[in-house]
Image (spheres, helix red, strand yellow):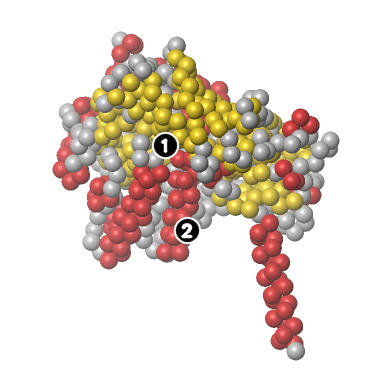
Amino acid sequence: MQSKLLLLNALFIIYLTSAHAQAFKSADAKDIALFPQQNDFRNTLNLSGVWKFKKDSLGIGEKEKWFDGLTGNRSIAVPGSWNDQFGDMHDYLGLTWYETEGYIPKGWKGQRIFIRIGAATYAAKIWINGIPLGRHEGGQMPFAFEISPLVKWHANNRITIQVENILKPSRVPTGGAVETSFFHNTPATNYDFFPYSGLNRAVWLYTIPAKTSINDVVIKTGFQGADGYMEVKVKLEGAVADGQVTVSGDGKNIKMPVHFQAGTGVAMVKIPNVRLWSPDDPFLYTVEVNIKQGGNTVDRYMSETGVRTITVTSKLVLLNGKPIFLKGFGKHEDFPIFGRGTALPVMVMDFSLLKWIGANSFRTSHYPYDEEYMNMADREGILVIDEIPAVGLYFHGDTTALKLRQAQCKRDIEELINRDKNHPSVIMWSVANEPFGSASFQVQSSSTPAANSGTERGMTCLGELIQMAKKKDPTRLATFVGVMGGPQRWLTLGDVVCINRYWGWYIGGGDIPGAIKGISNELDATYKLTQKPIMLTEFGADANIPGHTEQPKMYTEEYQRDLIKAYLDVADGKDFVFGMHVWCFADFKTAAASMRPGAMNYKGVFTRDRKPKLSAYYLRSRWNKSAN
Ligand code: GCB
């Protein structure tokens, strides 16, 4: 009898736990396919501002029902990382709670209402008016949930978001991993940037029409001779409807009907005398989709996109059929006080500095950036290598964590391509930065059983991710970024080879002639192996010694400039090198570590507050023809 009671009790507890767990829906990647938009049929409300905030270091918030109202709170800016906003929370990565309240405009009645969080780093749970809504993992991607049934009219609505950024080997990016012997940082990141945490991007409320709405618009472009074309695929939710696609710009206004079958319709739009998108002429057409029922328009979505192609030969990357050389940087979203929080004036300044220096591209190292970056890159004609947050991956050791990381990488790819698919600036997906096959640089290329199994697993996992990106988006290139000393075979997996190299810095520090030899030989050997175009996605040197010196020693601005020059000269002599990205655009915050004075990486050619170093002037003289 007693054991029966115990069993019933256990079943009841399992039932309760699963009922509670089910209460939080997992975010669906399809809900971020279209950025919220204000027009006659859709509404938006940006909830950026000062929110209530509370640290939950004991993990008692859920038990104490903090979602019913956050007492004893303090104020926090959203967007913005919490780490630099408070003196006592810099290294805190545990549970926190955010809350805001507000009325839903009464004109929104009858529409479907959603909440969209631009980025909650790393994991979030949401409650609306104290009722569990949804959860999401992955710190740099947006997620959205419908909140219509939970909304109160003519009253305040309380939005509560629990966020934590605990570093775990099962997460992406990866932290707290005992298998990796080469990182001893505080906090224990498996990567070289500070784990800025919290609601780092804007939170929106938005509506879509209740009956029939546009769910997705996927635009693929190309051209033949003087004719451009756009394949505009529209996905609908709700009742059957007819649609029209209008492509306008450059004196054209081309209308095409769309007929739907099972919720999907495609318009093939031909654009005579097309104006192609390129860094020299980043021309954007407007693509307007209108959905009609019984002659009346019931939904509309507008996108701006450019017509361009990106292809590859055994030596070159071609934009619109012509060779393109990528000049630019790996970057970070990083600024004092904002942390990794969206800082629009900094973003605008960065684009103007990219132009000033004569760069034509950057990589979103090491995670997707705010969507405003992508819009700006489209308008400014800056090419983007769009990277998922897969940094610090490793393939040896514990397979449970490895499987979880791989699943997270797949979710990231799904979400990122859903989000960024229509940006002409995005030419390539990067599915990882510097994954490791084994525990140390020395073992990487050796043939010990541990190194072999890590290399094999890496081959499979990275191969899967690259193929997934290519399948989801056959119109762009896909690759990963390889680490110095990493398994060579992995480099054959992508459409192109991207490698980070630190000859003259981490290897042979101070020796520029040695660096020239090292990088030159390595480039030749890598090309021989892969027969694919190669890009250096990182090379550089820290420069943080104040003042100038006639002795270009490590850490001086002179050494940084001379090393960068040496690499660029080597690349000029290799016809299979299609790009050179200096690491890094600006100095940035890292975890505390022995080679990071003041927890800073000083490889920026601009300081953290965007002052040019010697190498910035040097690059401008080399890259920006109009500056000479
Ligand atoms: C790398 C990493 C980058 C680091 C850089 C460095 O290879 O990709 O995240 O910041 O080296 O400066 O060590």
SS at badge 1 = strand
Residue, x 69% and y 33% (percent of image)?
Answer: 47
Q: Amino acid at mark 1?
A: Asp
Q: Is mark 1 within 8 Å of ligand 1?
A: no
Q: Earlier in the sequence, mark 1 or mark 2?
A: 1
Percent from the top left, x then y, of residue 287? 49, 24
Residue, x 60% and y 30% (percent of image)?
Answer: 292
Depth check: give the residue in front, 112 or 440.
112
Residue 545: quadrant of the picture: top left
Residue 16: quadrant of the picture: bottom right
Residue, x 27% and y 29% (percent of image)?
Answer: 318
Left or right, 28 with reference to 3: left
In the displayed orientation, state which residue is furthest to the bottom: 1
Q: Which residue is mark 1?
A: 386
Q: Quadrant of the C terminus?
A: top left
Q: Which mark is residue 489?
A: none
Percent from the top left, x then y, of residue 62? 72, 56
In the displayed orientation, state which residue is furthest to the right: 154
Residue, x 48% and y 22% (percent of image)?
Answer: 255
Q: Which residue is mark 2?
A: 404
Q: Amino acid at mark 2?
A: Leu
Residue 7: quadrant of the picture: bottom right
Q: Quadrant of the N terminus?
A: bottom right
Depth check: give the residue in front, 191 or 26.
26
In the displayed structure, would residue 45 be above or below residue 239?
above
Depth check: give the residue in front, 10 or 150.
150
SS at badge 2 = helix
Does any portion of residue 515 appear in the rendered image? no
Percent from the top left, x then y, of residue 111? 71, 36
* Label 1 Cα crowd, 10 Å radius (few <14 / some 14-19 / many 20+): many
Does any portion of residue 447 appear in the rendered image? yes
Percent from the top left, x then y, of residue 373? 49, 29
